Image (cartoon, grey):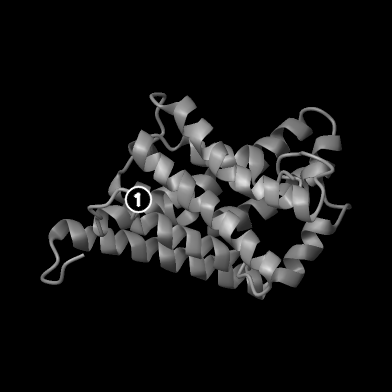
Amino acid sequence: MGMGKSTIEQKRLNADLWIVLITTFAALGICMAFQSQFNNVVKNVQIPILLRTLSAAICQFSIAGLGISIVAIYRKESFFSHGLRLKGTLMSIALSVLCFFPYIIFLSITKPITSYLPFQAVWVTKEALSSGFPVNVITMLIIATAWGFFEGFNYVVISDKINQRFPSKNRFLNWGAIFCAIACILIHSLIGVTLLGFIEMLTVIIIIYGMLIVREITGNAWGCIFIFVFLWNAF
């Protein structure tokens, strides 16, 4: 992280990060400004569930996914270059799941876990599942893509870009993972002001920081995506 004149590669990475940052905050601002109208549409059962799911997914994707997609298209950069590969997949998933255990323990102690369902915190999930075939399959694929794949992979790409721009000599001092953990805490309003809130915040930091460290060690990003498809918002 030395000072001095930036190289062409550093300037490229700066631009990539700014594109993601501006896109994310612009989308977040728009979604917040029209939150009331958005909620009315998503909760309106008179509108077909597929259309409501699609509108909610577009909003989610614009916040977590659109920025990295713009960069990938502009740079002609493949998502596969960010750890989407078969080698190391099982190890990546297993180690990432271990990072999630402190949060599960926290939940089981503070508020007993009564059910497990991926994406149950997403408003349209239960209604989507109760819909007939093939609407239920299509809506769940949309949900899994927006709230699962892209939310998890968004952290991976941002972390990779930050680590390329600000490399660390210490494998476990990972600037990208640190930034993403802090961003997750802020976006999901998980700043702990009570003892229990602080402990919950720490468990979430362990999830985000841990899974991104696992991605660095294994070279595989599927563990991060697995977390957001099967565990995040599932309890």
Residue pointed to by mark 1? 172
Q: Is residue 153 left or right of residue 105?
A: left
> Which quadrant does the C terminus fall into?
top right
> What residue do we see at 37% from left, 34% from top?
218
> What residue do we see at 77% from left, 34% from top?
136
User: Would you identify the image quadrant in which residue 18 lies?
Assistant: bottom left
Is residue 8 shown above or below 102? Answer: below
Q: For the residue marked with disc 1, what is the amino acid?
A: Phe
User: Would you identify the image quadrant in which residue 174 lies?
Assistant: bottom left
> Which quadrant does the N terminus fall into?
bottom left
> 142 or 219, which lies in front?
219
> 87 or 84, which lies in front?
87
> What residue do we see at 83% from left, 58% from top?
43
> 112 or 146, which lies in front?
112
Instruction: Give how far across and how far down residue 45 sits, in percent.
Output: 88, 52
Instruction: Give how far across and how far down residue 209 sits, in percent.
Output: 46, 52
Answer whether residue 224 is visible to the viewer in this image.
Answer: yes
